[in-house]
Image (cartoon, helix red, strand yellow):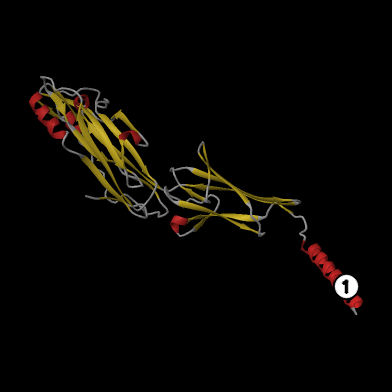
Amino acid sequence: MKKNYFGLLATVAICVAALFAACSSDSKEEPITDHAAGEFKIVNATRGNAVLENNSVEIYKGDVLKIQFDSKYKKDFKKDYTVTVGKDKYTIENNEFIVNTGDETYTFNLNASFDEGDTHLSASQTIKIQQKYKVSVPYVLYITEDLTKLVKVNVDFSNEAGKTYPMEDLPNYRTEEHKDVYTYVDGGFTYYTFNKPEAESYAEHAGPLTANTVPMLVLDIPYYRFGIDTEVILTYQQKADVENHDYNIGRSFERKKATIVSPKEDANDKDWRYTVPMFTGEQMTSKETKDYIAKLIKEKDIIKLRIDVDGNVTERN
C-alpha cells in the first residue's frame, strides 16, 4: 500500500510540473516591433482641455498645455518631449508646458519608446502650434525738445500677468521725431503743431513745414492674453538744472488705435476716435519752467485699458 501511495504522489508531481511548464510556455510573449505604438495629443488645460491640432492657433501667453500619450500596449513607455520656440529649445517635464512668449510658433517633438528583449515599441509625432491672437497698442508721448533736456521719462507697464515692469523690460520702445509736425514762430519763439493751417497762418514759419521737430517716445506694447486690465504709467525725474532763459515746455501722452487679431472678427478698439492731434508746447520763463517741473515730478501720466475675452479694447478710469 505504501508503494502505491508514493507512486501516486510521483505521478501527481510529474503532472503538475508538466502543467506548469505548459503554462510558462504559453505566457511567454512573442517579440513585437511596432513603430506606431500609440498617438499623442496636446490639450489646452487653461481652456477646457481643448485639443490642439497641428497648426492650431488657440493659445495665449500663460496657458498650460498638457501632452497625452495613448498607447496600444500596456507598457511603461519612456517619453521624451521637447518644444522649440524661435531659437530656444525646452525639455518638457511632467507632460506640461506653459506658453511663455508671444506671437511665436511652438514646435513640439514628441517621442515614446519601450525596448525589452526582442520587443521594440515606439511612436513619434511633431505638432506645430501658432500663437496668433493678440492686441497691440502704440502709446506715444509727445514732448518738446527743451523738456527732454530737463527731465528723464520713466515707464512702468503691466502685462498679461498683471504685474508691473519698468521701461527696460518693454518689448519694444523707441525715440523718434514726428514727420508731420509743423513749426511756426510767434514773438521770436518757435512753436510746434500738427495743424498745418495753424502754422501757415503765422507770418513766419520755420520751413519746411514737414520738418522733423518734435521728439516722441513710442511704446509698442503687445498683449497676448485677453480678458485683462492694462495700464501704462509715466513718471518724470529732473536731470538738468533750469537756466535763466525761456523754454518751450509741453507734453502730451496719448495712444493710437489698437491693432487686434482675434477669433472674433468684429473685435475692435471701441473707445478710439480719430482726431487731428495738436501739440504746440508753451513758452515759459525760467521760473515758470521750474514750477512746471516741480509739479511734473509729483504727477503721473496714466493710460488704462481693458481687453475683454474677445479682444475688444475699452478705456477705464
Quadrant of the rendered image containing residue 182:
top left
The front one of 253 and 36 is 36
Residue 311, position in %: x, y? 36, 52
Classify 9 as above or below 202: below
Q: Residue furthest bottom?
A: 1
The front one of 188 and 151 is 151
* Amino acid type, label 1: Thr
Q: Residue furthest top?
A: 244
Classify 151 as above or below 30: above
Residue 156, position in %: x, y? 28, 38
Identify the residue shown where x is 18% and y is 29%. Answer: 199
Residue 285 showing in the rendered view: no
Q: Secondary structure at mark 1?
A: helix
Identify the residue shown where x is 16% and y is 36%. Answer: 298
Residue 153 showing in the rendered view: yes
Quadrant of the rendered image containing residue 109:
top right
Residue 208, position in %: x, y? 25, 23
Residue labelled with disc 1: 11
